[in-house]
Image: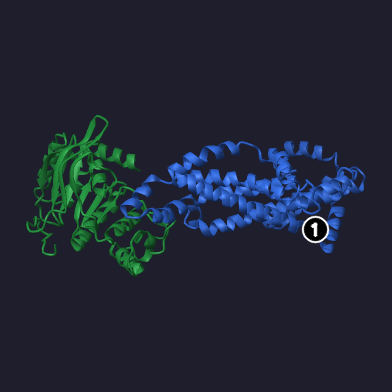
Chain colours: A blue, B green
Amino acid sequence: MTEKTFDPSSASSSFSVNKAARHTGELQGASRLLPNWVRNWRTPEVLLRLLSPIALLLLWELASQAGLIPQRVIAAPSQIGGTLWAMIASGELGKHLLVSLQRALVGLSIGVSIGVVAALISGLSKRGEVILDSPLQMLRTIPSLALVPLFILWFGIGEFTKIALIVTGTTFPVYLNLFAGIRNIDPKLIEAANTLGLNRRELIWHVILPGSLPSFFVGLRYSLGISWLALVFVEQINTTAGIGFLASDARDFMRTDVIVICLLIYSVLGLLIDGLIRTLERFALAWRPSFVRN
Amino acid sequence: MSSIDLLNTTKPAHSPAPVQLRNVVRQFGEQRVIDGLDLDIAPGEFVALLGASGSGKTTLLRSLAGLDSIDSGQLLVPKARAAVFQEPRLMPWKRAWKNVILGLHIPDAKARAVQALTEVGLAHRLEAYPATLSGGEAQRVALARGLVREPKLLLLDEPFAALDALTRIRMHRLIIELWRKHTPAVLLVTHDVDEAILLADRVIVLANGKIADQLTIDLPRARDTGQEGFQAIRARLLSLLGVEVDTAAAAERRAPNASIRRFAHG
């Protein structure tokens, strides 16, 4: 279904592909239209990129309408769109989204803070490394979701457990990356700083922290991903609000449309947050060659 | 210091040498990299240090820069010193002018940075990040960063080795100009015999951690390799370094070395 499929220059290969397309009549109809469109107008790349998803959605819709895909398996796009609209209009989606975002943000900010502090302690002092690094390395190998039973016993099934699980998941990526970033600073730069007469505080502030910032951002990206993952999981423990709750609730009522909406929200949020971090990096790491050239 | 005539090399007798080394020893394990070295550098004197790899040049420079300790002996260096290395060693996250005044606690720092960068001909690159500077420009920022501290001793560790030939010629002129203006004592570590003769008042040849020989270069400035007497000094220094040359074959012999060095530092 790539553009090459419709390339008339190599007759034999396009012939065989056309044959395969004949099995699904709808596709052929749709795909005959699109390449003409492409050939006549120099369409912007964005539109070209949208072609295949739109075609897929169309196919999906038609298959659902025709009864080929039962609603129990997955709802039709139109139905999903309708439900999405209704949920937005009623404010239900906004409410759950807010709760989830709040959990993720609270957990993430605590986790990242702990990770940063721990990395600074063990990265900047030999004694700190001796004391902190090996226990943290041990703890990090435990999958944070495996702590769920213990956390429930300790902290109950309330909000605290949920936040605590996100915290344990998000601490270590930041810790590991920032620690490595601090230790991997070019020793020549440290030497230069010493010959320039920087004291320890200035060395940390002007050399070590800015130099380890790129690694911190790598850790932050990992942590964000993990915070979403943890969210999906913890919101299935005794909750009445949140995207994870919405999804598990929908499962009980076989509302495949709501489940798809939840998945969509996760992916859109992931995209948005990645964009946010990119913007942050653009400002914070403006000195890096890749950014400088732009 | 102001009375020193830098055009014609003289050692002023009246002020004490800012750099005094007495029987300095630095050893790594059993190997004595610096082995009982005595060295004085007069105020405002430009000294070049030549020597084969492993002769202890860099170790000596690092000791003088305070980056390495010595195992025994006496080492006196001024507190006001600056070092420029083969790589510019600029902080990539700081703009050029901020790199220049890094670690400097003075009021009106920006004006000083502007002044220092203007001196090295980079007034137009004040706000540039090091990643956008060419090799020569970055090295000039490093030079400005050293000189803005008004050092009594300027340490140069093969600062021109990684530059292309044309840039190197310009840098030679610039360094002499700045040296005359700021009058620090200079210790230049180099592999390049021509460079040493072009720039220095005195060339020291280091071998096995000791001063094997030294030569006062009294050629009038501005010098060039075609100058009368230049080739004689060159042949003498090369023979001290264990390279026997007659002047005609010199260029050919040197060429492969030069290219190897350039690759090694590329």
Residue occupying image coordinates x 80% and y 52%: A261
The C terminus of chain B sits in image quarter: top left
Residue at far left of view: B13
Instruction: Answer few, some or many: residues within 10 Å of disc 1's Cα (few below 14, many 20 plus, some between 14 and 19).
Output: many
Query: In this rendering, would A146 be left or right of A127?
Result: right
Residue at far top of view: B30
The N terminus of chain B sits in image quarter: bottom left
Q: Is residue A182 visible?
A: yes
User: Is B128 in front, or is B29?
Assistant: B29
x, y percentage for residue A97? Answer: 75, 57
Which residue type carries mark 1?
Answer: Leu
- Displayed quadrant of residue A41: bottom right
Query: In this rendering, would A166 be left or right of B140?
Result: right
Element on which disc 1 rests = helix
Query: In this rendering, would B67 be left or right of A5?
Result: left
Residue under label 1: A93
Residue occupying image coordinates x 13% and y 53%: B17
Residue occupying image coordinates x 48% and y 44%: A122
